[in-house]
Structure formats: C-alpha cells, structure tokens
Image (cartoon, rainbow, N blue to C red):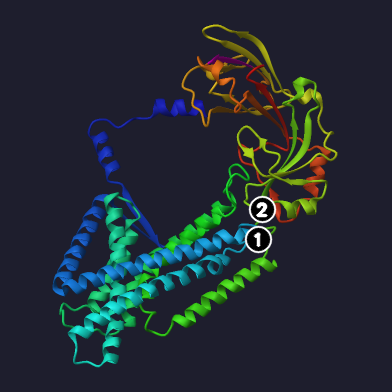
Amino acid sequence: MLAFLLHAGASSKLPQGKAMEADEKTGHNPAIFFDILGTYMVVYRQRFANMMNNSVIMQSLLIWTTSLLMGGYSAVISLALSCLTVILMWTCSLTFSALVAFVLPFASSTPVPFVSSPWLVVGLFAAPALLGALAGQHLGYLILKTYLSKVISERMVNLSPVTQANLAKLDAERWLYKAGLVQWLILLMIGNYFKIGSSYLALVWLVSPAFSYGLLEATLSPARIPKPLKTLTLLVGLSVPFLISAGIFIQLAGTIIGIAVRFDRNPGSTPEWLGNVILAMYIAVIICLTLVYLLSYVHISGAKLPIILATCTMFGLSLIAVLSGIVPPFTEDTSRAVNVVHVVNTTKYGTNLEPDSYISLFSTTPGKLTKEAEQIGEGFVCGREKILDFVTFSVQYGCWSHQDAGSGWSESDIPTLHVDSDIKGYDRITQVSIDTKVSTRWSLKINTKEIMDFNIKDNSEELVPLGDKNSIKGWHIIQFSGGKKSPTRFNLTLLWAKNSAKLTHMKDPHLLLKLRTDVDRLTPKTETVLRKLPSWCSLFGKSTSPMTLAFLTSLPVNF
C-alpha cells in the first residue's frame, strides 16, 4: 500500500495557478444533492442554496412582520402561545418515547428486541412519541383557545357564547398550523447560517405548506371570521415534503438500528438503554417535525380519541410481542454478534503462577448473555467481575468458563517480554525484546504516562521510528499483522519520561506494557462451545478483535 501511494503521489499532477484557485472556489461552493424516491437526482451548488434560502427567509420574515403589525397585540400573544404548543409537543413527545426506551431493557430479555423485526419500533417508540406529541400540543391548544376566547368575546360581543367558542377553536387551529411554519423557518435559518447541506429539507417543509396555506386559506383582513382549515390545504402542502424526505427518514432509522446492534466498542461499557434512547429520540424528532401540521387538524375534528386508542393498542401489541417472545429479537438471518475466545492470561506467569486459561464469551450487541450461556452450558459464568483487557479494547461484561480449558495450547506458544537492559540516569532508556512465538498478529499497548518515546525494530528494519507519538487515555496502541513469513522477534527501545519516578507510585496504571498475541487455532474447548452456540448467534470479529486463541501478557512498571 505504501509503495502504491508513493508511486501515485509522484506521478500525479497537482493543480497550479488558476486551476488551484478554481478548486479552492469549488471547495467553498460544494454541491448539494438528493434523490427523489431513488429515481431522480437533484443537484445544485451551495451558492444557489444560499440565495434561495435567504430569499425565502426574508420573505417569510416580511410576511410575519406585516401580519403581526396588522393583527396587533393579540396576534403577537397568539403567536407566542402557538409557539408554546410546539415546545410542549416536543417536550412531551421526547419524554414519552425516552421513558419507554429507558424502561424497555428492564422489561425485555434484550435491550434491542427490534433487531430482527424493525417494524416493532413503530409500536414501541413511534406510538408513544405520537401520543406525547398529541398530548403536549393539546395542552398548548387549550391555553391558546382560552386566550382567543377572551379576545373574541371582547371583539364580537354581539355573537352568542357558543359561536364565540367555536370561532376560538377555529382560530386556534389556524395558529397551530402557522406555528409549524415558524418551527421550520427557525430550522431553515439555523441550517442556512451554518451552511448545512440538508437544509433543503427545512426549505421544502416550509415553502410547500406555506404556499398551500397562502393559496387556500390566508387573508390579510384583520377582521376576518375564522373558518375551518381545508383538508386540501394539508394534502397540497405535505405531498411534496413527504415525497422528498420520507425515504431519507426511514433509511436513517434503519441505520440507527444497525448502529444500536454494534453500539458497544468495549462490551458492557455503555448503559443498555442508551441505544434505545437515541433511536427513540430520533423517532420523536421526526414525528414532531413532520406531523406538526397534521396535528393542528386533530383537536377540533373529533379524531383525538381514535388516535389515542390506536396508538395505545399499537404500543400494547408491540410490547406483548416482545415480552412473550412471539417475535424473537434475533434469528438465524439476523443473528447476534458474539466472540468466543480461548484466553491464556500469562500476566502473573513471571511469579511462578500458572497461566489463567479460560473461554471468554462476549458480544458487542447490548444486553446480557445469560440465555446464550444457559443453552451452551459448559460451566459459563456471566457478570462484570472479570474485566478483560484485550489491549485494543476491554470487556466490561462477558461470560467465562475454566472447565476443560487447559488443553489446546502449550507453554512454547506463550509470548515473552524480556528486559535486555535498563540504563538509569538523567535519560533512562530500556531495551525490551518481544517474542510473539507462533503469532504473526499481535497488539501492544505502551504506557505513555511513563514512556516519553519509543521505537520498534525487527531483525531487518525499523518499524516504528522515534517521534510523533499520540496516546488515548495514557496509552499508545500498536497493531501488527503479518504473513506466514512475518518476523516474530522484535526489539523495543523505551525512552522514559522525566517525571516517571513519580508516576510509578500511581495505582492505575501500574503496567508498562500490555501484549496480546492472536493465534488462528481452535482448541478442543473452543470447538465444543462453537458447536453448541445458539442458532441466533454468529461469530463477528472486527479488525481489532482477537482470534479464537489469544495470549495476554504484560510488563509491570517496577520490573
């Protein structure tokens, strides 16, 4: 790869003069593109998007200013109360969906019961989010209607109380619709200011409903008599936005579900409810953004009760399907990713203690492994008592079994970290020889709180030179993967930090080096466990994951 990059870099022609200026201008004027139903592609530049967005924003602000000036003080209050309904809608929707997402891992056998059946998220998260949005907006609607009733009763004293109440309802309905326009206008202004490419969504969701309302509903007369919103206004206003954005929103939901399955880099390190909460919050946001216009029609249409019953029924059926196991969380086609590794931990081998040999079972998919361990048998114990550091990551929760784990490896396979020399003085330098034995794939972690710099050599060349070292949480990680003829002996030169004497008294970290060597070998115990692995599980290994046999060894700071 290095040879290819050097050749490509030497033979490439970099732009110069006007060509470079053109490239720079293009970089400041990137393309914005999106498709419609995967069939038509729309492409335009950021400069055109800025002009279009600015034009729509200025026209919207001008229309709103004129409308409020003509409507007077009551119009300003009505706008503020209608915006309050949007805030209450967001608050209740996010709260309802997040509450379900938080409780679900405690009620279900797995935190992500919707993996094999993504449609479950409609009942589990979308239904509570819609119910919360309706509840929050209805609360704001009641406050807005109370204020409008007072205003109408003062202006139209010749009308009967029943007529005044009906007019207040109709006027509140219109203000709720217009509050949706304000919501998308604010989002368009934010997206345009930060030049966010996806601001075209806010533009479409603002322009189309605004055009529909202006064409079919709006009037500049401040003394107008409120009328019911036309269904045609909703259909005309929302057809184009839904056509453009529905596919994107659904695909992104599927992506979040996929991320939730591989959420833990360090298995067991994050709360089980976190992935659910992220997905639930996303669904609640989409509902609040897209249904803000539709919900404005609900409050005086008599549809509240059917919607409440439908959402509660959908949520109840989805919850029953999850709790009863009718819809399993994992299947053979959509399986749970697990790792089965025979671990030989030789960290204490230098003190004449036997290596700790056991089978480790862990998963990057959130949730416990008790069901899997029960089906496998073989003496597995699950919990957080045995934190396992695999150098490139750590297992905070997993299962392990020492039963019949002493065969399939020999002491000749155990890697070694041997201190060849340790020159102490003003500049302390330590030479360490590394022998990975049968392994040509290994990972090394170096304590950068103790070591200022280092280099690594094999028998023929320098693999890692001195200088430009970075670290993550006080450790520098090296990963090596070679072929069959790859070297297995390396020389590591460590240059200690000036204040290393103070750091050696720290309780954590107390190790100088951590080494993991991987061997692609099935021990008898590992083979047995893999044979008994449930059908809904499958092996999944990242580039940083260990192979089926891994040796762990380390070198303490006070060697």
**Residue 393 spot, x, y in % from top left:** 61, 37
> Is 346 placed above or below 65 here?
above
Q: Nearer the viewer, residue 54 or 82?
A: 82
- Comparing 443 with 31, the one in front is 443
Q: Kindly identify the residue that appears in the image at 32 percent across and 81 percent down.
A: 232
Check if residue 90 falls in the magenta segment.
no
The reply to whether residue 171 is visible in this rendering is: yes
Residue 453, visible in the rendered structure: no
Q: Secondary structure at mark 2?
A: strand
Q: Mark 1 highlights which residue? A: 329
Q: For the stretch drawn in magenta, what is the main secondary structure?
A: strand
Confirm whether the magenta stretch covers residue 493: yes
How far apart, in angstroms, are the residues tagged by discs 2 and 1?
Answer: 9 Å
Which mark sits nearer the N-terminus, 2 or 1?
1
Amino acid type assigned to the residue bearing label 2 in the image: Arg
**Where is residue 240 drawn, in percent x and y?**
35, 69
Instruction: State the extent of the magenta-drawn residues as a range.
Output: 491-496
Res. 114 image quadrant: bottom right
Q: Position of residue 371 (x, y in %)?
A: 74, 55
Q: Position of residue 238 (x, y in %)?
A: 35, 72
Q: Is residue 269 above or below residue 472?
A: below
Q: Which residue is mark 2?
A: 336
Which residue is pictured at 39% across the width and 79% down the height? 298
Residue 285 found in image quarter:
bottom left
Q: How many marks?
A: 2
CB under 8 Å between discs 2 and 1: yes
Amino acid of disc 1: Pro
- Mark 1 burial class by Cα count in 10 Å: few <14, some 14-19, many 20+: many
Position of 443 relative to 522 (above/below): above
